[in-house]
Image (cartoon, rainbow, N blue to C red):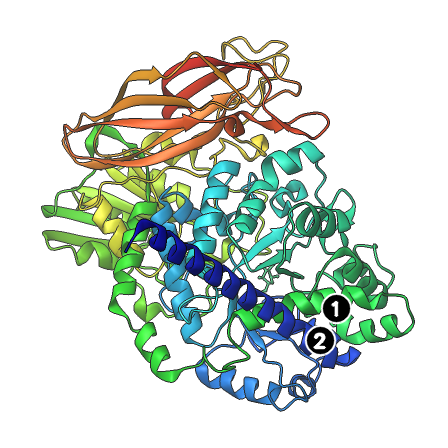
């Protein structure tokens, strides 16, 4: 075929495809509009109404309605907390008896796995492994979709810099850039490239916005912050989720500068639906609409419904404000029906995209439910993600990895045999028969060690079995202690004013330490903890978060060296709760501490160093890495140029292993005081023992930009400092360059 013919055919194909896609897109919008024209005002309001099934995840509303009756009348658009092919088919059938047969959306908090429980999101964030995180979300979506669910209330993308806040366990930690990358990976994992597959569900970016900055780390509390902090630090992960195509947003319980998020037009209309042009829909968080009354921002549910719909809250979860008042408010001309129509369009569009009008039962398939929920691959992937999430905080005299045979190992502590705790909080269904405890994981390792066990104490210190634990330790060559929080000490409504080890665990540790036996402490929790004695006295410390069903196997793989730990902290570990909020991206201040011994009239505490116990990005390996041969492509770049930064990374130890190399930048002089350093890129690199690889980062003007006093996103000319390292407090290479404006 001649080139001219080939070009003609290609052009025709492209036009026809684009036309078909446009027609298809127009078709969904047209189908939405034609359905909207048929709907009564009551039916429109019904689409904005969401009820919870029996597994409630919030305070239950007193006047429990006859849900099925409302569903049969087309007065419900979605149900949450209904799962399983049988139940979803049964309730969908009721919805299809309504006049217009509009199918329901079924939703649930599938935060870190449905049947296969993966590590909590904060643990996965510690892997810094976007493919691992994506695959975790993808499997969660496959299993959720197999039980009739269309929509998960995840990823939670709130930046969390206050470990007193229990929900830090649900997010990606303290950093804006890492959080944005993880938000993207999770949205792609849950939704796939395009909605509509029965191995994908709608994702939900939550909680919009700035919920992680709740005052005093207390859940549901107020948030006060500057526009600069909001846009620079807390909004970017939401924007990343929106750019990744997240189907829905969920608003948050907090006020932002005095106005509850669910009634906040600045957030939901000006930013999300306006500046960002977001086309999905916003669901309230549980009863957040009705809670505006308790905030003293709405006089009653009718007032709350008015404020919420005007502010861009499209669907009302559980407060029954919309179903109770919106129809009358429109009839009384207190609310413009256009606002209701816009919300209905956004919701119907998703139902069309999911293919629910073609087949309302397509996600409720018994054969697929059986097959997917029992896929043996899922637990293997969960184990891989779990071991990648473990952070080695300390390893004195290379006590780890442990020998697999010939040793007597005492496993001591309240979490040594625990199963439910390893699942963590926010799981749709606990099944401890599928969980491998730490003790079981160690025992199942194919070696010839002898294992002893003693609980020593319980989490809250009500039990005292110290003597037995000390006697057990004395019989061992090495002690592995499993300490931490219980699974329900982090998560929603689980703020702690004191984040040290609960109960008498520190006492137990000190009693075992006094035997002189070498100790590996495995700490498990949903947040950073404070554990000064352990950090100073234990030979090795491993942070294992809550790793899910495969936690025991993953920890054993790390302790015996079958997997060389590669995790890095996604959140700062303070020395004291008095330092909070504490982040690596702090400021110089006008009186920086240059020498810790000279703090007179400096920005410092008189009773504690400013530095954290463990810094953001910290995590050790069984091998060592050398950074060298830093090269930058230029010492000056213009705004439209890209600076290439390269360096050699060598594995100088005896184990192959992965290193997360981190690129931090500093803008030392700018029109607002900028942080001492900000993470701008990272790579997780596998190196065999003795191997060297050249790593390259690209720095464009977007990585140099920030919001100036006029809230413009600008890259200002001047010097910039480059810091490349293994942690935010372990910088190995430094350089600098100039951004010129011509
Ligand atoms: C809860 C949580 C939210 C969750 C919702 C539904 O209160 O704040 O994250 O998705 O209610 O369970």
Residue at x 35%, y 62% (from the top left corner): 419
Residue at x 46%, y 39% (from the top left corner): 178
User: Crowding at label 2, few (<14), some or many (≥20) Cα neighbours within 10 Å?
Assistant: some
Residue 130 visible at all:
yes
Relative placement, left or right, of 454 versus 578 is left
Residue at x 31%, y 42% (from the top left corner): 521
Residue annotated with mark 2: 36
Disc nearer the start of the sequence (2/1): 2
Residue annotated with mark 1: 341
- Residue 174, numbered label: none
* Picture layout, residue 20 above or below residue 393: below
Indicate which quadrant contains ligand 1: bottom right
SS for dot 1 = helix
* Picture layout, residue 65 above or below residue 300: below
Asked if the residues shown at circle 2 and circle 1 are in contact, with their CB atoms under 8 angstroms apart, the answer is yes
Of the 4 image quadrants, the one containing the C terminus is top right
SS for dot 2 = helix
The residue at label 2 has a CB less than 8 Å from ligand 1: no
Q: Where is residue 44 shown, x and y percent of the image?
A: 73, 75
Relative placement, left or right, of 404 versus 592 is left
**Count of residue discs:** 2
């Amino acid at each position: 075929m001649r080139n001219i013919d080939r070009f003609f055919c290609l052009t025709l194909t492209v036009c026809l495809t684009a036309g078909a896609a446009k027609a298809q897109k127009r078709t969904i919008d047209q189908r939405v509009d034609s359905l909207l024209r048929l709907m009564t005002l009551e039916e429109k309001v019904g689409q904005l109404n969401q009820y919870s099934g029996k597994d409630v995840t919030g305070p239950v509303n007193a006047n429990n309605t006859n849900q099925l009756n409302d569903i049969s009348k087309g007065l419900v658009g979605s149900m949450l907390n209904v799962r399983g092919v049988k139940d979803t088919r049964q309730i969908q059938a009721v919805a299809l008896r309504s006049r217009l047969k509009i199918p329901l959306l079924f939703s649930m908090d599938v935060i870190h796995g449905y049947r296969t429980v993966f590590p909590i999101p904060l643990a996965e964030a510690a892997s810094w492994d976007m493919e691992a995180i994506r695959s975790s979300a993808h499997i969660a979506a496959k299993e959720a979709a197999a039980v009739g669910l269309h929509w998960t209330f995840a990823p939670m993308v709130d930046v969390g810099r206050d470990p007193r806040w229990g929900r830090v366990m649900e997010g990606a930690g303290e950093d804006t850039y890492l959080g944005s990358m993880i938000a993207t990976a999770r949205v792609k994992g849950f939704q796939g490239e395009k909605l509509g597959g029965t191995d994908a569900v709608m994702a939900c970016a939550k909680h919009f916005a700035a919920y992680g900055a709740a005052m005093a780390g207390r859940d549901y509390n107020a948030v006060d912050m500057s526009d600069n902090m909001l846009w620079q630090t807390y909004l970017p992960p939401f924007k990343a989720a929106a750019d990744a195509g997240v189907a829905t947003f969920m608003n948050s319980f907090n006020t932002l500068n005095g106005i509850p998020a669910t009634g906040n037009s600045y957030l939901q209309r000006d930013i999300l639906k306006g500046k960002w042009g977001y086309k999905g829909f916003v669901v309230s968080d549980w009863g957040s609409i009705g809670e505006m009354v308790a905030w003293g921002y709405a006089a009653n549910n009718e007032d709350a419904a008015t404020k919420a719909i005007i502010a861009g809250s499209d669907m009302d979860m559980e407060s029954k404000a919309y179903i109770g008042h919106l129809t009358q408010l429109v009839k009384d001309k207190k609310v413009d029906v256009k606002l209701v129509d816009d919300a209905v369009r956004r919701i119907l569009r998703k139902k069309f995209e999911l293919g629910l009008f073609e087949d309302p039962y397509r996600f409720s398939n018994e054969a697929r439910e059986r097959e997917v929920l029992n896929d043996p691959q899922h637990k293997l992937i969960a184990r891989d993600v779990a071991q990648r999430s473990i952070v080695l905080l300390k390893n004195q005299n290379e006590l780890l990895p442990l020998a697999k045979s010939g040793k007597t190992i005492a496993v001591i502590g309240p979490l040594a045999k625990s199963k439910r705790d390893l699942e963590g909080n926010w799981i749709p269904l606990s099944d401890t028969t599928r969980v491998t405890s730490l003790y079981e994981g160690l025992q199942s390792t194919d070696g010839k060690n002898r294992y002893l066990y003693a609980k020593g104490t319980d989490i809250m210190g009500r039990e005292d079995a110290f003597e037995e634990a000390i006697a057990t330790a004395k019989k061992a060559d090495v002690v592995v202690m499993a300490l931490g929080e219980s699974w329900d000490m982090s998560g929603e409504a689980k703020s702690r004013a004191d984040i040290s080890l609960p109960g008498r665990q520190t006492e137990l540790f000190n009693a075992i330490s006094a035997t002189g036996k070498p100790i590996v402490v495995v700490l498990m929790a949903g947040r950073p903890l404070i554990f000064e004695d352990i950090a100073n006295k234990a030979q090795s410390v491993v942070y294992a978060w809550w790793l899910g069903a495969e936690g025991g196997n993953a920890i054993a793989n790390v302790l015996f060296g079958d997997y060389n730990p590669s995790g890095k902290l996604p959140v700062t570990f303070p020395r004291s709760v008095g330092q909070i909020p504490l982040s690596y991206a702090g400021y110089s201040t006008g009186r920086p501490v240059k020498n810790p011994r000279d703090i007179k009239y400096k920005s410092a505490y008189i009773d504690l160093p400013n530095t954290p116990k463990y810094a953001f990005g910290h995590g050790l390996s069984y091998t060592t890495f050398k950074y060298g041969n830093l090269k930058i492509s230029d010492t000056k770049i213009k705004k439209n140029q890209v600076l290439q930064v390269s360096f050699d990374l060598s594995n100088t130890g005896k184990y192959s292993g992965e290193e997360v190399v981190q690129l931090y930048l500093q803008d030392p002089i700018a029109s607002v005081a900028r942080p001492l350093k900000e993470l701008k890129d990272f790579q997780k690199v596998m190196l065999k023992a003795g191997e060297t690889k050249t790593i390259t980062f690209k720095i464009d003007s977007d990585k140099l930009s920030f919001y100036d006093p006029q809230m413009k996103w600008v890259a200002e000319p001047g010097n910039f400092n480059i810091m490349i390292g293994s942690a935010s407090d372990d910088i190995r290479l430094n350089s600098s360059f100039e951004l010129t404006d011509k």
